[in-house]
């Protein structure tokens, strides 16, 4: 039986994943207050980037209302370093989407991303029983597409003129998926990546 993602803490040695709360907005603003985070299309692109901490409240509200959103915290310091979500939950068809992920540039290239993927994908497949997890990115964000493929997801194609960006233009979305049959291999690769890189 497939169940809805739980709004509870998920954790491993690298990250603490806590349900995102409205009062996380100031810390999330501080973590993501860098044009590079938004340039790849996150949150609607550069035009959606808040100028002041109060502006992140709207972004956090959208993340919370759109699905199960988590604040990503460094397991050692407790500092908020990003966010990620399980979206578009469809229990009948046993599928959801892993997305809305963004991290502070200070943790780029560290184990945080792999640890977050391990935590949320593990929750989706092992705890909730999903058979398919979809991932999407703007086709202009080639580094993200490469990262998703490196994760072990299968590229399924492109949705043309799929989503409106904050600047009014429309993005094409590259679509990837991981199936429950793929998950053991993906999980093993993520664990290997975490073992290879000291925290």
Image (cartoon, rainbow, N blue to C red):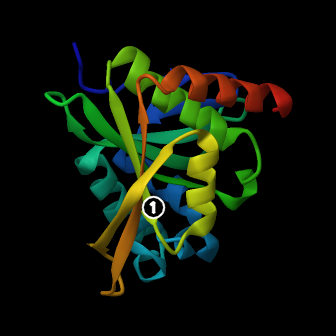
Quadrant of the image occupied by residue 4: top left
Quadrant of the image occupied by residue 30: bottom right
Query: On the image, numbered disc 1 is attached to which residue?
Result: 137
**Residue 111 on image: x %, y %:** 73, 39
Residue drawn at x 52%, y 62% is 29
Could you classify mark 1 by the number of other residues whose Cα lies within 10 Å: few (under 14), some (14-19), or many (20 or more)? Answer: many
Residue drawn at x 69%, y 60% is 105
Look at the image and tell me in which quarter the N terminus lies.
top left
Residue drawn at x 48%, y 80% is 46
Residue 189 in the figure: left or right of residue 134? right
State whether residue 9 appears in this view.
no
Residue drawn at x 80%, y 25% is 195
**Residue 77 on image: x %, y %:** 71, 35
Q: Residue furthest left?
A: 92
**Residue 137 on image: x %, y %:** 45, 61
Quadrant of the image occupied by residue 15: top right
Foreground: 61 or 170? 170
State whether residue 76 appears in this view.
yes
> Image height check: is 137 above or below 55?
above
Q: Secondary structure at mark 1?
A: strand
Foreground: 23 or 60? 60
Residue 146 in the figure: left or right of residue 129? right
């Amino acid at each position: 039986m497939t169940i809805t993602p739980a709004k509870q803490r998920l954790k491993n040695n690298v990250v603490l994943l806590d349900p995102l709360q409205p009062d996380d907005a100031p810390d999330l603003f501080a973590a993501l207050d860098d044009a590079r985070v938004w340039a790849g299309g996150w949150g609607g692109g550069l035009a959606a980037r808040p100028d002041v901490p109060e502006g992140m409240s709207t972004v956090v509200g959208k993340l919370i209302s759109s699905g199960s959103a988590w604040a990503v915290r460094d397991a050692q310091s407790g500092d908020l370093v990003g966010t990620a979500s399980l979206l578009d939950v469809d229990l009948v068809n046993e599928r959801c989407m892993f997305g809305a992920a963004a991290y502070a540039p200070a943790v780029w290239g560290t184990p945080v991303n792999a640890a977050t993927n391990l935590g949320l994908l593990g929750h989706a497949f092992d705890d909730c029983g999903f058979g398919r997890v979809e991932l999407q990115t703007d086709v202009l964000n080639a580094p993200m597409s490469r990262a998703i493929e490196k994760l072990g997801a299968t590229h399924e194609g492109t949705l043309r003129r799929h989503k409106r960006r904050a600047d009014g233009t429309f993005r094409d979305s590259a679509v990837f998926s991981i199936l429950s049959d793929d998950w053991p291999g993906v999980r093993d690769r993520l664990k290997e990546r975490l073992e290879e890189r000291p925290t």
